[in-house]
Amino acid sequence: MTLELRPFAARDQSWLEGWIGQAARAMQCDEDALAGLCADPTRLRLVIIRDGISAGVLAARERAPARGAAIIDLVATPRVHARRGVAMAAVTLLEQRLRRHGARTIYAPVPEAHGIAVYFWIRLGYRPLMRGAWPEQRDRVVWMRRDPSAQKNGSQSRMA
């Protein structure tokens, strides 16, 4: 599998609209909020490209909640690419980029009612946080945290 991340572009909007509602329902979250993350120009928005085909999206904030940290707000793939390792490999690539830009701690909000998503982040080495350690207050999420140290990469990949 060859995987790369490239910046979200206007041409990606119609592709995204074709499946983001389905992803929101699967993740048990609000479709408008999910689409809003992809549209927010203040976030790092990336398209996951697997073997030359658009396979998902990521949204993150560098230097959030403070310098030396980052928040991955969204990882989503269309059903056809789900549960095939694409999202996990993409998060690994994104973590590499965030580390190069100074992030020593990475956070991810996960819908509390979506156990599969919690398990996804745990498999990536993230751990749940107690409410007092959350980077920001948000309803109906479990905040996860990871302090990545070693670079791991099991697939041929590159960052655009």
Image: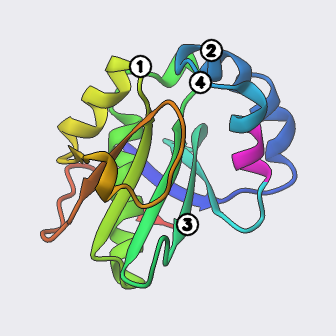
The quarter of the picture where the C terminus appears is bottom right
The amino acid marked with disc number 3 is Arg
Tell me if residue 51 is in the magenta stretch.
Answer: no
Residue 8: image x %, image y %? Answer: 72, 56
Badge 3 is on which residue?
A: 61
Q: Which residue is depicted at the point 55% across and 46% down?
A: 49
Q: CA distance from mark 4 to mark 2?
A: 12 Å
Q: CA distance from mark 3 to mark 2?
A: 23 Å
The amino acid marked with disc number 2 is Arg
Determine whether the residue tagged by mark 2 lies in a helix, strand or loop.
helix
Q: Is residue 152 left or right of residue 39?
A: left
Disc with the residue nearer the chain's start (4 vs 1): 4
Q: Give the residues drawn in magenta, as a range.
A: 35-39
Residue 11: image x %, image y %? Answer: 86, 48
Q: CA distance from mark 3 to mark 4?
A: 22 Å
Q: CA distance from mark 1 to mark 2?
A: 10 Å
Q: Are marks 4 and 2 in contact (CB under 8 Å)?
A: no
Badge 4 is on which residue?
A: 78
Badge 2 is on which residue?
A: 25
Determine whether the residue tagged by mark 1 lies in a helix, strand or loop.
loop
Q: For the residue carrying disc 1, how many other residues have a C-alpha within 10 Å: few (<14), some (14-19), or many (20+)?
A: some
